[in-house]
Image (spheres, coloured by chain):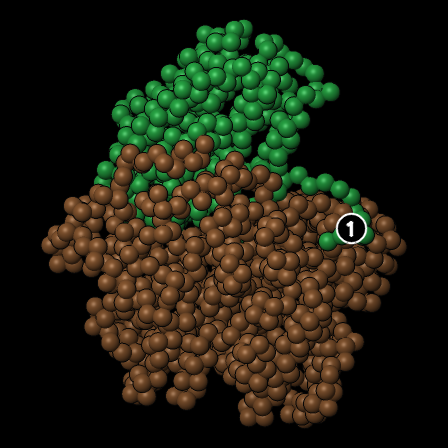
Chain colours: A green, B brown
Amino acid sequence: MLLNPGFNLTLRPMKYPAFYEMYRSAIKNTWTVEEVDFSTDLMDLQGRMTDAERHLINRLVAFFATGDSIVSNNLVLNLYKHLNAPEARMYLSRQLYEEALHVQFYLTLLDTYIPEMREREQAFAAVDNISSIRQKAQFCLRWMDSVHKLDKLQTESERKQFLLNLICFAACIEGLFFFAAFAYVYFLRSRGLLHGLAAGTNWVFRDESAHMAFAFEAVRVIRREEPELFDDELAGNITAMMEEAVACETQFAEDLLSGGVAGMSVAEMRRYLEFVADQRLTMLGLPARYGAKNPFPFMDLQDVQELANFFERRVSAYQVGVEGEVAFDHAF
Amino acid sequence: MSAVAAQVPSPAAPENAPTTMRVRKRNGALEPVDVNKIVRAVGRCCAGLTQVDALRIATKTIGGLYEGATTKELDALSIGTAASLIVDEPEYSKLAARLLATYIDKEVTNQEIHSFSQSISAGHRLGLIADRVAAFVAANSRKLNSAIEAERTGLFEYFGLRTVYDRYLLKHPERRTVIETPQFFFLRVACGLAETVHDAVELYRLFSTLEYIPSTPTLFNSGTRHEQLSSCFLLDAPQDDLESIYRKYMDVAMLSKFSGGIGLAYHRVRSQGSLIRGTNGHSNGIVPWLKTLDASVSAVNQGGKRKGACCVYLETWHADIEAFLELRDNTGDEARRTHNLNLANWIPDLFMRRVEEDGVWSLFDPKDMPHLTDLYGDEFERAYLSAEAEGLHVRQLKARDLYARMMRTLAQTGNGWMTFKDASNRKSNQTAWLGAVVHLSNLCTEIIEVTSQDETAVCNLGSLNLARYVSEGRFAFEKLAANVRLAVRQLDRVIDINYYAIPTAASSNARWRPVGLGVMGLQDVLFQLRLPFDSPEALTLSTKIQEEIYFHALTASCELAERLGAHPAFAETRAARGELQFDAWGVVPEDAARWDALRERMKEKGLRNSLMIAIAPTATIASIVGSYESIEPQVSNLFKRETLSGDFLQINRYLVADLKRVGLWTDEIRARIKLAEGSIQGIAEIPDDLKLLYRTAWEVPMRALIDLAAARGAFIDQSQSLNLFAESPNIGKLSSMYMYAWKRGLKTTYYLRSRPATRIAQTTVSGATAAGFKEAEAVACSLENPESCEACQ
């Protein structure tokens, strides 16, 4: 079973080929920070955006800069330890690289966006000195600490505790906090602002989606192997955790939008968070909690295939890793 | 589970909030938001639209406001709100466009600009409009002002008008407000290109009906002080010395500055390891030079409007070919990567034959073989084979290994376009005389023109919007003929007006006078006439359209030659011997008599232009006119366009009309189309004939695209930007595909489009809920839950 303690090394026969396939797909989507073109972002920040919007961006980037590091830490300290299958650990290793890449992306972004040294240091220390970000970080750290002491998942209650950690990072942090952050970025992009941020975020979003899919696949496997863990108590705890995450992100929205941003109100953001939370609960086989509809049409945009004009942006859709040999009789 | 969810009331209930909200008016006073007022303002733009709901726009708009927002923000928000509903109901695109048109009119009239001539004189005062054009308009203001047909702005869809507003309308240099309406803009462009009022009004009619549009540089700059109107520049390779290499950077920068796209050959520069006599060192090859070019290209911003763009061509025998193919990789040594350059292979037939017979391929240093790039066909092969026999090559490899490497580059980067040197030269009108050689194509692989150290090829482009040529179930060939002649006269005129940033471009363009008349909206025609992309009828029609365009373009050029004289290099062309493009393809057109008559007339009077036809990708202008790009199949029934002015959702409105007709345009079907990323193939309820018609580029066989391209190729004297698509490319499929393209005689191909290996999670529909969608929707729409159903409001 996936949660049985130990360090399994057996790749053949492979027990969870889905994890291995996810690892392979992830490899095909390699991107680098150097490919992101920030050239028009600074002009947008200085010339085309209001103070309220600049405030939003500064806060957002400050969150990003620390958010991915927290996720990395949890991955190393908790997930890698307890998900006992070599193919799962291959995926997690790849994920760890991607998290580092994201940190590098937001580091580059902050260096570019905030030229003033002291201000920049402030942004990196957001966890300590910006209350709305501190609250989010505390939420993450609390769930991280909750399993930190566990060396081995022996009892049912320990396994449930671990499941909550796994679900917290997948559904609440990557699946809600990050999805909210992406919404702000896509809102600005829908108005033609900050292409560099949007282009990089697009790739980050693609990675985060894959991380979430992996975690949910792990949950599905655990449910198949140990259905008894998924009782009403766990369901109640997940829903409560989700509610807390929504509240936490709402107070962040109040800070971000405090200057007044036309086209994005706190009430709508709240509704969006509820909508996303419902989706996460549904993915976990739990009843939706809010029954909210997506209020943001620009997130519809996000779902739809991109067709970029290459004069304006680099197309982000190319694959890495192509196989096969020269032939002249294949169908095309 | 979903049923339970639908009954839970939303705790935030933001719909109730707006009653206390206030907006700031233009005079600074605060005023409570009045839903009815917004409804009335939106309602005024709804005439003739039956499927839109002004109240829905008003309430959604208010939901996005904040306390103290300005009325201008409110206007902008209501436009955005209407635009966001386009996928639910395509008519919202028209509504959003009308709201935007009103917004633009307000902006223009607020500056006391009420007529075309006022707009021009304002532009002139601000230093934007050329003296020549200002004088022309001042002298003819009454006639020109009365030519304006304001209601033609109603032809725009939202995306098109938005693009025009954001990027094409002239702006006040400090205030950044636009000083012309869309109709003033079209007439301004026309006046810049016309010699008489009659011409100007004719051209204005052509543009404003969206039946034909000149290319972006012409739209940007016509009538202004910077009359750089050409799209494409093709530069021969620098000579193999330092001075020449650096002079070429300068040429590229000067040409990029005013919105031109650059093609640049690099065949003449020595390869890595070659001895440098002056310093007794060894060369690092072409990569460091291209790295410098990469930086230079991204530094030059085209008039602040878009970034510079350049494609580098390299012959397949060049010894640096493998390093060249890695320039766009996103791993490896950054010093050997050029993320901003596009790359194209300039491939001789001999290479493709070696690939086919699984032979070896020899790589040469241009320093040893400087003549290879100036030869094509049999002469090239003789020179190549004898050099090979003498062992002059730098090294050899299996032809198939190199070919596989090319395919990999295409799959990984979309770049490394396959363009064919011998087909391009053999079928060129400009290569009749010895020594005239085509060395490369351009940034978008549709221009095929000779270059040399003294000649930089130039081409100015325009495209017929085929979507506007179908009426009563048939294609309007007569209208096409008349418009082609008008368009050719306009394109020819550009050659004389155009500002040339470097002397080699001016001299070459005066000698050859090439133009590139293209098309867009072929997919629209096929949808309108209900012809699947790979049907025999589509092949026949597409070829016929191209034949007619070629015929009437040549006729118009012949008429111009009668009036103004043939282009100076006419005697050096194949046309002077009576040879036309289809002769080179071994094709005999229908109605040989009219072609024979044209040939005779041509031999006697000459042609004003050495080249007439080039099919460009039309990325931006197709979005202005709201048609599918170029000759391409649709990429998806539902897709997003990302541009400098933001993101826009596009829906296939032909599909929507058909689904409405059969009662299938429902929330559920919409969600399923979205889930399938714009494909309808997996939706069982949709009838088979619609599925066949509305396949996407990923679903139509590429063989059909190549066949269509080859058939119309007989009537294209330059080339076409032919994108190919592969959902999940592998070497076997790609190598088969490009071998076929070569065998069919294509001169060039363009991007290989593929899709990402993993996807972003869809936020607004999810796989998990989609299965239970039907049930959830049924509950949500029932009368017991009126609040939860936005569709019924």
Q: Residue at x 49, y 76 (%)?
A: B211
Q: Amino acid at mark 1?
A: His
Residue tagged 1: A330
> In this rendering, does residue B640 appear at all?
no
Residue at the left extreme, as displayed: B29
Tally of numbered discs:
1
Left or right placement of residue B224 versus residue A166 in this view: left
Q: Residue at x 62, y 42 (%)?
A: A319
Residue B386 spot, x, y in % from top left? 86, 59
Q: Identify the element where label 1 is drawn.
A: loop
User: Quick check: B495 above or below B414?
Assistant: below
User: Quick check: B326 above or below B610?
Assistant: above
Residue A194 spot, x, y in % from top left? 38, 46
User: Quick check: A63 above or below B628?
Assistant: above
Considering the image in quadrants, where does the N terminus of chain B appear? top left
Left or right placement of residue B685 versus residue A274 in this view: right
In the image shown, does B379 or B180 lie closer to the viewer? B180
Q: Residue at x 56, y 88 (%)?
A: B560
Which chain is indicated by disc 1?
A: A
Q: Residue at x 48, y 20 (%)?
A: A166
In the image shown, does B169 or B423 lie closer to the viewer? B169
User: Quick check: B331 above or below B729?
Assistant: above
Left or right placement of residue A35 versus residue B358 in this view: left
> In this rendering, does residue A30 appear at all?
yes
Disc 1 packing (10 Å; few <14; some 14–19; many ≥20): few
Residue A212 spot, x, y in % from top left? 51, 30
In the image shown, does B462 or B31 lie closer to the viewer? B31
Residue B731 spot, x, y in % from top left? 73, 46
